[in-house]
Amino acid sequence: MKYYFVFPLISSLLYVVGVMFMKQCSGLGVGIWRTSFVSNIATALLFVPVLGFGGVWRPWTEYWQPALAGLMFVGGQTFTFVALRNGDVTVATPVMGLKTVLVGLLVTGIIGDTVSPRLWVSAGLSAAGIALLNVVRGARHRHVGGTIILSMVAASCFALFDVLVQKFSPAWGIGRFLPVMFGWVTVFSFGFQPFFSAPLSEIPREAWKSLGWGSTFLALQGLVLICTLGHFGDATAVNVIYSSRGLWSVVAVWLVGHWFSNQERQLGGGVFRWRAAGAAMMLIAIILTLV
């Protein structure tokens, strides 16, 4: 196992903490558009110090590259928040495990890497895991089907984002490509403002704590994961480990979800056992890919 695999593992844990705060935030009237805006600005600010890693300023005709990657990031984040607003963390997060398979396919088509047989096995196990998440009829009022679709769209956007970072970063250097890319993310995020339910100044005081912590943890996990992709590449393997967030989300909701006013644990032991089985199957896919 390569030493930098520890970075996506750390990122996966930070991600789960972040979405737990964001799920709590969605119940406090902030809304997905204000949530996305604040989170993106926090992430962009955290990437400013990355300029210190240096690199090459590319010609203006190549600035579409970080712009396209930034657009995929904003799209993935927006669909993630929509999924979390309408559904459960324990459904949305494990479905994101499909991102691993999508990254493998996109790396093959865009960069030219090959997809190993183990990755196809991982794809089958991931699909089976999603089936287990959706078979429990007791969860029908939680918009399981819609949550899965929205999470799959988010995973597709993030998969393309990861592959573009791996493809374009070497020519720029992470100290140039990543800060420029998040400059574009900031620009795109201002497009959310017409959809705000109210100005940022009217966000309830009690919601700012959840929004602030959620944005911080998501920004940190983005910093760790994206810098790893930009510097080391190896997007498929990195995402295999990062997809462990599906299992961590189930564990977190069961153990500490009540700290975040998360009600998913009250769905009952039967529902939770099926969801845990689905997440565990995705974890098996991860192990098969790494061994």
Image: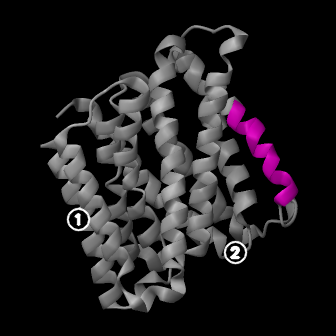
Q: Is residue 187 magenta?
A: yes
Vertical position of residue 59 compared to residue 4: above or below: above
Mark 2 or 1, which is nearer the eye? 1
Dot 2 or dot 1, earlier in sequence: 2
- Give the main secondary structure, helix, strand or loop, of the magenta stretch: helix
Q: Which mark is residue 281?
A: 1
Residue 266 seen in the figure: no
Q: Secondary structure at mark 2?
A: loop
Q: Residue at x 45, y 32 (%)?
A: 163
Q: Which mark is residue 178?
A: none
Q: Residue at x 55, y 63 (%)?
A: 150
Q: Residue at x 47, y 66 (%)?
A: 92
Vertical position of residue 222 compared to residue 124: above or below: above
Disc 1 marks a residue whose amino acid type is: Met
Residue 196 seen in the figure: yes
Provide the residue span drawn in magenta: 184-195
How many angstroms separate mark 2 from mark 1 (CA)? 33 Å
Residue position marked by numbered label 2 in the rendering: 28
Q: Position of residue 41 (x, y in %)?
A: 70, 43
The answer to which quarter of the image holds residue 112 is top left
Q: Residue at x 43, y 38 (%)?
A: 225
- Number of marks drawn: 2
Q: Would residue 119 be found to the left or right of residue 155 on screen?
A: left
Q: Position of residue 277 (x, y in %)?
A: 25, 74
Disc 2 marks a residue whose amino acid type is: Leu
Q: Would residue 21 be found to the left or right of residue 242 on screen?
A: right
10 Å crowding of disc 2: few (<14), some (14-19), many (20+) = some
